[in-house]
Amino acid sequence: MANSIMDFIEENYKELLAFAVRLNGSLEDGEDVFQAVAAKICQKQNELKDLTVCKTYLMTCIRNATLNFQRAKARQYKADTGFETLKECMPDPKAKEAFAVADWVGSLEQHLMHYEEPLRKAFIAYYVDQTPLEEVAASLGLSKRQTTKKFESMRTYLKRHYKHLFMELCVLLSI
Protein backbone atom coordinates (compact mmCIF):
# COMPACT_ATOMS: atom_id res chain seq x y z
CA MET A 1 0.00 0.00 0.00
CA ALA A 2 1.18 3.55 -0.78
CA ASN A 3 2.71 5.61 2.03
CA SER A 4 2.18 8.97 0.33
CA ILE A 5 0.14 10.44 -2.45
CA MET A 6 3.21 10.47 -4.73
CA ASP A 7 3.69 6.76 -4.17
CA PHE A 8 0.02 6.21 -5.01
CA ILE A 9 0.45 8.16 -8.27
CA GLU A 10 3.48 6.06 -9.23
CA GLU A 11 1.71 2.79 -8.44
CA ASN A 12 -1.53 3.73 -10.25
CA TYR A 13 -0.09 5.83 -13.05
CA LYS A 14 -1.70 3.90 -15.94
CA GLU A 15 -5.19 3.87 -14.40
CA LEU A 16 -5.06 7.57 -13.50
CA LEU A 17 -3.78 8.50 -16.96
CA ALA A 18 -6.48 6.35 -18.60
CA PHE A 19 -9.09 8.16 -16.50
CA ALA A 20 -7.70 11.56 -17.60
CA VAL A 21 -7.65 10.46 -21.25
CA ARG A 22 -11.24 9.18 -21.02
CA LEU A 23 -12.42 12.49 -19.54
CA ASN A 24 -10.57 14.61 -22.10
CA GLY A 25 -11.22 12.54 -25.19
CA SER A 26 -7.61 12.49 -26.41
CA LEU A 27 -4.26 11.19 -25.24
CA GLU A 28 -2.54 14.57 -25.62
CA ASP A 29 -5.13 16.47 -23.59
CA GLY A 30 -5.32 13.68 -21.00
CA GLU A 31 -1.55 13.74 -20.55
CA ASP A 32 -1.55 17.54 -20.24
CA VAL A 33 -4.23 17.47 -17.55
CA PHE A 34 -2.63 14.57 -15.67
CA GLN A 35 0.80 16.26 -15.71
CA ALA A 36 -0.74 19.50 -14.41
CA VAL A 37 -2.43 17.59 -11.56
CA ALA A 38 0.77 15.67 -10.75
CA ALA A 39 2.76 18.93 -10.66
CA LYS A 40 0.28 20.50 -8.23
CA ILE A 41 0.29 17.38 -6.07
CA CYS A 42 4.12 17.50 -5.95
CA GLN A 43 3.97 21.08 -4.70
CA LYS A 44 1.37 20.23 -2.02
CA GLN A 45 2.52 16.76 -0.98
CA ASN A 46 3.44 17.95 2.54
CA GLU A 47 -0.13 19.20 3.04
CA LEU A 48 -1.53 15.91 1.74
CA LYS A 49 0.41 13.55 4.03
CA ASP A 50 -2.62 12.46 6.03
CA LEU A 51 -4.85 11.82 3.03
CA THR A 52 -6.71 8.54 3.56
CA VAL A 53 -8.50 8.11 0.23
CA CYS A 54 -5.88 9.01 -2.41
CA LYS A 55 -7.75 7.53 -5.37
CA THR A 56 -10.93 9.56 -4.79
CA TYR A 57 -8.93 12.72 -4.16
CA LEU A 58 -6.84 12.29 -7.33
CA MET A 59 -9.83 11.46 -9.50
CA THR A 60 -11.59 14.57 -8.22
CA CYS A 61 -8.47 16.62 -8.95
CA ILE A 62 -8.27 15.18 -12.49
CA ARG A 63 -11.97 15.86 -13.09
CA ASN A 64 -11.65 19.47 -11.88
CA ALA A 65 -8.49 20.00 -13.90
CA THR A 66 -10.26 18.58 -16.96
CA LEU A 67 -13.15 21.01 -16.50
CA ASN A 68 -10.72 23.93 -16.16
CA PHE A 69 -8.76 22.72 -19.20
CA GLN A 70 -11.91 22.39 -21.33
CA ARG A 71 -13.11 25.86 -20.24
CA ALA A 72 -9.75 27.35 -21.13
CA LYS A 73 -9.84 25.63 -24.55
CA ALA A 74 -13.37 26.92 -25.14
CA ARG A 75 -12.35 30.47 -24.19
CA GLN A 76 -9.34 30.26 -26.47
CA TYR A 77 -11.46 28.91 -29.33
CA LYS A 78 -14.02 31.65 -28.77
CA ALA A 79 -11.27 34.27 -28.70
CA ASP A 80 -9.67 32.87 -31.86
CA THR A 81 -12.94 32.65 -33.78
CA GLY A 82 -14.02 35.99 -32.36
CA PHE A 83 -10.84 37.56 -33.69
CA GLU A 84 -11.36 35.92 -37.08
CA THR A 85 -14.94 37.22 -37.16
CA LEU A 86 -13.75 40.65 -36.09
CA LYS A 87 -11.01 40.57 -38.69
CA GLU A 88 -13.59 39.74 -41.37
CA CYS A 89 -15.71 42.69 -40.24
CA MET A 90 -12.86 45.18 -40.12
CA PRO A 91 -12.83 47.46 -43.12
CA ASP A 92 -9.90 47.26 -45.45
CA PRO A 93 -7.85 50.47 -45.05
CA LYS A 94 -7.38 50.60 -48.82
CA ALA A 95 -11.16 50.41 -49.30
CA LYS A 96 -11.67 53.33 -46.93
CA GLU A 97 -9.08 55.33 -48.85
CA ALA A 98 -10.73 54.37 -52.14
CA PHE A 99 -14.13 55.53 -50.85
CA ALA A 100 -12.60 58.84 -49.72
CA VAL A 101 -11.05 59.35 -53.15
CA ALA A 102 -14.32 58.39 -54.84
CA ASP A 103 -16.22 60.91 -52.70
CA TRP A 104 -13.66 63.58 -53.46
CA VAL A 105 -13.79 62.82 -57.19
CA GLY A 106 -17.60 62.99 -57.10
CA SER A 107 -17.42 66.35 -55.37
CA LEU A 108 -14.84 67.61 -57.84
CA GLU A 109 -16.93 66.46 -60.78
CA GLN A 110 -20.03 68.13 -59.32
CA HIS A 111 -18.20 71.44 -58.79
CA LEU A 112 -16.91 71.40 -62.36
CA MET A 113 -20.40 70.75 -63.78
CA HIS A 114 -20.42 73.78 -66.05
CA TYR A 115 -17.54 72.24 -68.06
CA GLU A 116 -18.28 69.58 -70.67
CA GLU A 117 -18.26 65.98 -69.44
CA PRO A 118 -15.30 64.78 -71.57
CA LEU A 119 -13.22 67.68 -70.23
CA ARG A 120 -14.23 66.91 -66.62
CA LYS A 121 -13.38 63.24 -67.11
CA ALA A 122 -10.02 64.13 -68.68
CA PHE A 123 -9.24 66.55 -65.81
CA ILE A 124 -9.97 63.84 -63.23
CA ALA A 125 -8.08 61.20 -65.24
CA TYR A 126 -5.02 63.45 -65.36
CA TYR A 127 -4.99 64.71 -61.78
CA VAL A 128 -6.50 61.79 -59.86
CA ASP A 129 -5.73 58.70 -61.95
CA GLN A 130 -2.41 60.17 -63.14
CA THR A 131 -3.08 59.35 -66.77
CA PRO A 132 -0.30 60.82 -68.96
CA LEU A 133 -1.08 64.19 -70.55
CA GLU A 134 -0.55 62.76 -74.05
CA GLU A 135 -3.33 60.20 -73.53
CA VAL A 136 -5.70 62.73 -72.01
CA ALA A 137 -5.06 65.21 -74.83
CA ALA A 138 -5.58 62.48 -77.44
CA SER A 139 -8.90 61.46 -75.83
CA LEU A 140 -10.06 65.08 -76.09
CA GLY A 141 -8.74 65.51 -79.64
CA LEU A 142 -6.59 68.44 -78.50
CA SER A 143 -2.89 69.17 -78.40
CA LYS A 144 -0.99 68.92 -75.14
CA ARG A 145 -0.72 72.73 -75.00
CA GLN A 146 -4.48 73.21 -75.53
CA THR A 147 -5.25 70.60 -72.86
CA THR A 148 -2.86 72.25 -70.43
CA LYS A 149 -4.55 75.63 -71.02
CA LYS A 150 -8.02 74.15 -70.41
CA PHE A 151 -6.83 72.44 -67.21
CA GLU A 152 -5.27 75.72 -66.07
CA SER A 153 -8.61 77.43 -66.61
CA MET A 154 -10.36 74.73 -64.57
CA ARG A 155 -7.85 75.05 -61.72
CA THR A 156 -8.31 78.84 -61.70
CA TYR A 157 -12.08 78.32 -61.54
CA LEU A 158 -11.69 75.96 -58.58
CA LYS A 159 -9.32 78.37 -56.84
CA ARG A 160 -11.74 81.26 -57.26
CA HIS A 161 -14.99 79.46 -56.37
CA TYR A 162 -14.10 76.34 -54.36
CA LYS A 163 -10.92 77.04 -52.45
CA HIS A 164 -11.09 73.83 -50.37
CA LEU A 165 -11.24 71.67 -53.52
CA PHE A 166 -8.39 73.63 -55.05
CA MET A 167 -6.29 73.07 -51.92
CA GLU A 168 -7.02 69.34 -52.01
CA LEU A 169 -6.04 69.30 -55.66
CA CYS A 170 -2.76 71.06 -54.82
CA VAL A 171 -2.05 68.42 -52.17
CA LEU A 172 -2.82 65.74 -54.72
CA LEU A 173 -0.45 67.34 -57.21
CA SER A 174 2.35 67.46 -54.64
CA ILE A 175 2.20 63.71 -53.99
Image (cartoon, grey):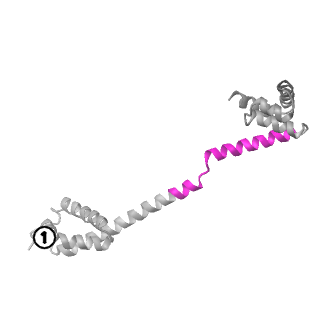
Residue 1 horizontal side relative to residue 98, left or right: left
- Residue furthest top as drawn: 145
Expressed as whole percent of the image width and height from the top left, the position of residue 166 reads: 79, 31
Above or below, 133 relative to 83: above
Residue 139 horizontal side relative to residue 170, left or right: right
* Res. 64 image quadrant: bottom left
- Mark 1 sits on what residue? 11
Expressed as whole percent of the image width and height from the top left, the position of residue 106 reads: 79, 43
Question: Looking at the image, which residue is at 32% across and 70% down?
Answer: 24
* Res. 161 image quadrant: top right
* Res. 26 image quadrant: bottom left
Badge 1 amino acid: Glu
Above or below, 72 relative to 1: above
Question: Looking at the image, which residue is at 55% across and 56% down?
Answer: 86
Q: Which residues are magenta?
A: 83-112
Above or below, 41 relative to 60: above
Q: Is 87 contained in the magenta span?
A: yes
Residue 112 horizontal side relative to residue 27, left or right: right
Question: Looking at the image, which residue is at 86% across and 36% down?
Answer: 119
Q: Quadrant of the N terminus?
A: bottom left
Expressed as whole percent of the image width and height from the top left, the position of residue 20 reads: 27, 70
Majority secondary structure in the magenta region:
helix
Q: Nearer the viewer, residue 130 or 34?
A: 130
Dot 1 surroundings within 10 Å: few (below 14), some, or many (20 or more)? few
Q: Is 63 contained in the magenta span?
A: no
